[in-house]
Amino acid sequence: MNMFKSKSYITCLISGLIMTLLLCSGEQWNFSDGAVQEYVFIAASVFLVAVFPLVVYKSAYLSRKAESIYDQLREMVLYLSRNWKETLQTIAVYCSGIAFGLLFAFLFSAIMSIEDNQMLNAAFVTVCLILVFVYRNRNSISENPEKGFAVIALIAGIFFIAATPTEVGICWDDNYHFDGTV
């Protein structure tokens, strides 16, 4: 089989391109620090786009795993194309949850006379998304509470990560915890 028509090669090539684009858009790449970061970035890009797909194509085990991922993605696309009305309805329900969260945050900040507070908006949106998820999946959560907890913990964890301030020096020991992160 031609390498460029292989499912595993195509899957890894596309994932490598996506990871490279994410690296490009990351704020941590500041090339004014010197040429070393530029070389690391170029090496990572070449590895993700050229070497990684080739290694996966040549390895039988990794090739099977990549083909499995390709087949799962294909099944997901087929499911979404067959059930597009249900998919759009689910997206609309979650978008309405985001809108209600922003509305509640606006009303709360207006009543409490709070200036524009993005963390308050994010907290209300997070709570509304969790409530929408619990309501929409109440039957499956009652059968498998660990799956419900995993999704709720993921939503709340993403909020806590986003809520962490990007400045160092707010607390007396921030420089020990966040020295190399910002």
Image: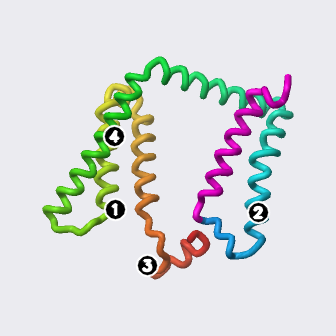
Q: Amino acid at mark 3?
A: Cys
Between 40 and 179, the one lying in front of the other is 40
- Dot 2 or dot 3, earlier in sequence: 2
The front one of 73 and 34 is 34
**Crowding near pointer 3: few (<14 within 10 Å), some, many (20+)?**
few
Q: CA distance from mark 2 to mark 1?
A: 35 Å
Query: What amino acid type is highlighted by mark number 2?
Result: Val
The residue under the point 42% across, 58% down is 160
Which quarter of the figure has residue 84?
top left
Callout 2–callout 3 Cβ contact below 8 Å: no
Left or right of residue 55, residue 123 in this image: left
Q: Nearer the viewer, residue 35 or 148?
A: 35
Foreground tag (3 vs 4): 4
Q: CA separation, marks 3 and 4?
A: 36 Å
Q: Secondary structure at mark 2?
A: helix
Badge nearest the viewer, 2 or 1: 2
Relative to 114, say whether 33 is above or below: below
Whether label 4 touches label 2, CB < 8 Å: no
Give the mark toward the camera: 1 or 3: 1
Element type at mark 4: helix
**Disc number placed over residue 40 in the picture, else none:** 2
Give the total number of marks visible in the rendering. Answer: 4
In three-dimensional space, the C-alpha distance between marks 1 and 3, rounded to whole angstroms, equals: 19 Å
Relative horizontal placement of residue 75, taking residue 173 as reference (left or right)? right
Q: Is residue 93 magenta?
A: no
Q: Which residue is mark 1?
A: 119
Which percent across, then down, holds residue 107?
17, 56
Q: Position of residue 71 (x, y in %)?
A: 65, 24
Q: What residue is rendered at 77% in x and 72% in y? A: 35
Region in magenta: 1-27
| Mark 1 neighbour class, 10 Å CA radius: few under 14, some 14 to 19, many 20 or more | some
Q: Which residue is tagged 4?
A: 95
